[in-house]
Structures are given as C-alpha cells and as structure tokens.
Image: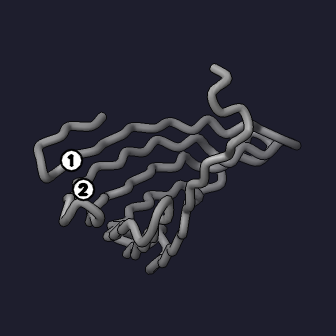
Amino acid sequence: MVKRQDPLVFVGSVSYEAALEEDDFDPGDALGFRLGAILAASPETSLRFLLDQRFVDDAEVGGQTIDGSDLTLATLEIGASSIIGRGLLLDIAVGAGLTEDAADYSVAISLPFRFDLPVGAGRF
C-alpha cells in the first residue's frame, strides 16, 4: 500500500512466505510486514524510515519440531537516495536490529543506473 501526502509517502506491505519441505526438512513459514515513510527532501533526494518485521515458524526435521527454532526478526532501516547524474542514482541504507534474532546492523550501498537502448526505438 502507498499513501502520498506531499512531501511524504507512507508505504506498507504484508508478506507470507511458504517454505517447501525437502529431504524431511521444513524450515518454517514466515509472516512479515513492513511500514515506513519516505520524505522528499528535494527534487533529487529522498530520505526513508522503515520498520521491517518477520515471524518465522519453528523448523521441523522428520516431522519433529525443533524447539527454539522460531524467529522474530525486526529491523529499523534509515536510508537516503539521491540522483547524482543523468540516469544514475545513489542509494544508501543502514539497518539496526531491534530483536535478538535480527542482525545487529546492516549497511547497503547501491548505484543503479538507467540507460536508453536505441534497439527497437520507434517500432511500437
């Protein structure tokens, strides 16, 4: 879901992941949600604040539940994206684990780019 209220955009999603059993091992299904806000700081730059939470069921081996294998993962992500050139975006995000099962921290840097291919232009 997305709700725009300039200069903010509120985002949210719900997910369900069904894990398939293989060789008598079932890693457990997962239910998650993600809520956050994205702020347009300027026409070229945005800031985002997201809460990401997942609940993972107990794993099973040979039909037997492994006690304590369930997980509760919660992460707070703070990030920024900025257009740094024609078709070039810099995205940086830092995450902090909010539960014992989540990673203590994470850092992600990406540099996606877009380019126009002249192949097929004007044919449609």
Looking at the image, can residue 100 be seen?
yes
Q: Element at badge 1?
A: strand
Q: Who is closer to the viewer here, 107 or 120?
A: 120
Q: Who is closer to the viewer here, 123 or 54?
A: 123
Residue situated furthest front in the rendering = 122
Q: Residues within 10 Å of mark 1 (few under 14, many from 20)?
A: some
Amino acid on which disc 2 is placed: Ile
- Residue 10 position in % (x across, y down): 21, 46
Which residue lies at the image location 56% right of the left edge and 55% below the top edge? 114
Q: Residues within 10 Å of mark 2 (few under 14, many from 20)?
A: many
Which residue lies at the image location 11% right of the left edge and 43% below the top edge? 5
Give above or below for 16 relative to 55.
above
Q: Element at badge 2?
A: strand
Which residue lies at the image location 38% right of the left edge and 54% below the top edge? 53
Q: Is residue 59 left or right of residue 13?
A: right
Looking at the image, can residue 65 be seen?
no
- Give the quarter of the image for residue 111: bottom right
**Label at residue 9:** 1
Q: Is residue 79 left or right of residue 105?
A: left
Give the mark nearest the N terminus, 1 or 2. Answer: 1
- Give the quarter of the image for residue 4: top left
- Screen quadrant of the N terminus: top left
Which residue lies at the image location 23% right of the left edge and 60% below the top edge? 43
**Label at residue 38:** 2
Task: For the residues labelled 1 and 2, say whether their Cβ atoms are less than 8 Å apart.
Answer: yes
